[in-house]
Image (cartoon, rainbow, N blue to C red):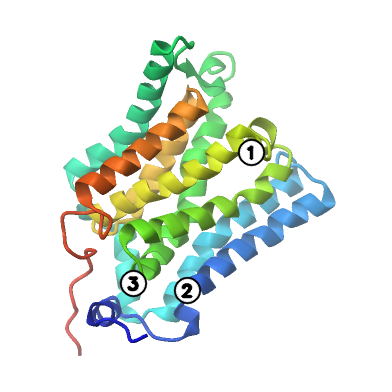
Amino acid sequence: MAQSSRHVRTRERLGITAGVVGSWWVYLAVAVGGTWAFWLAAIAVGVRFDSPLGLVLLLVGLAVPGVSGIAFVYLVYDERGRADFWNRIVQPRRVSLHWLAILLAVPLGISVFAGVIDLLLGGPGPAWGEGVTQFEVNPLALLPALFFATLPPLLEELGWRGYALDRLQLKWSALSASVILGVVWALWHLPLFFIGGTHQHDVVGFATTSFWLFMAGIVALSVAIGWIYNNTARSIAAIVVFHGWVNFTAELIVVPDPIYYGLWFVLLGVIVARWGAKTMTDAPEVPLPPTPARG
């Protein structure tokens, strides 16, 4: 099928070269396969991620999506696309104060609102996470929350949103692209459910109700991230902050999983109803960088 003129223009403006390497599925296969190689190795040798060897395998696996994203940027994009990639990391003006407030308010609001709903339904309501309750006794108890709020989002989002989401949006609507990426992102986590020392193994468990909520919730979160991404001029920095803040608030405020993840799907519905599925913005097309002068 011939590409639409919009997609051709999009490729030209992003400075994208043609070829199989530039296909979205190639990157996703490398990102997932590369991570799984290290995490499946941890399963094979029977190490936990809270052991020295396990921590190395965890961190290297976490780095694969971002490192692969940078590599694909340099393989697929020309100088304009490469410059655009780094600008989306370092240019704070892409994020207006309005959208900065939204990306900070949404994760905290969902956690707090989920706790209030639980309280109204007769539950115990929101509770502080272990890092907060143990902070006075051991200030280092907050380290896991700080870790999940900083390093993983940075290592992941350089690839997931920094590279893959743009590639998917060349072919599909913003909603469809975000859902596809969300499904792959959820599957990327699977080995963690079989390795001791991870939240997925020690707390969630494989094939439990919480497991299915976790996996579905990642897809809903991916849509919210796509919405933030497109409304902040495709800012990678904004997504790193948003992803990290989601992780941090979830570690600090403990609420029932069904309500918490359910609210992310409510947000998904609001996004589609208010902004539409095509771009999830008020713009008719996904915002793109201006066409640079040719020299």
Would residue 70 be found to the left or right of residue 166 on screen?
right
Mark-to-mark CA distance, 3 and 1: 33 Å
Judge whether 203 appears above or below 286 on screen. above
Mark-to-mark CA distance, 1 and 2: 29 Å
Q: Residue furthest bottom?
A: 295
Residue 139 seen in render = no
User: Residue beneath label 3, please?
Assistant: 170
State yes or no: discs 2 and 3 in contact (Cβ < 8 Å): no
Q: Camera-side residue: 117 or 185?
A: 117
Q: Secondary structure at mark 1?
A: helix
The amino acid type, in three-letter code, at marker 3 is: Leu
Judge whether 226 appears above or below 16 on screen. above
Residue 66 x/y as whole percent: 50, 61
Q: Specify the quadrant that holds the N terminus.
A: bottom left
User: Residue beneath label 2, please?
Assistant: 72
Residue 197 seen in render = yes
Q: Earlier in the sequence, mark 1 or mark 2?
A: 2
Number of other residues with Cα within 10 Å of mark 2, as a class: few under 14, some 14 to 19, many 20 or more: some
Residue 11 x/y as whole percent: 30, 79
Number of other residues with Cα within 10 Å of mark 3, as a class: few under 14, some 14 to 19, many 20 or more: some
- Badge number at residue 32: none
Mark-to-mark CA distance, 2 and 3: 16 Å
Residue 68 x/y as whole percent: 52, 67
User: Residue beneath label 1, please?
Assistant: 200
| Nearest-to-viewer mark from 2 and 3 | 3
- Determine the image quadrant of residue 17: bottom left
Mark count: 3
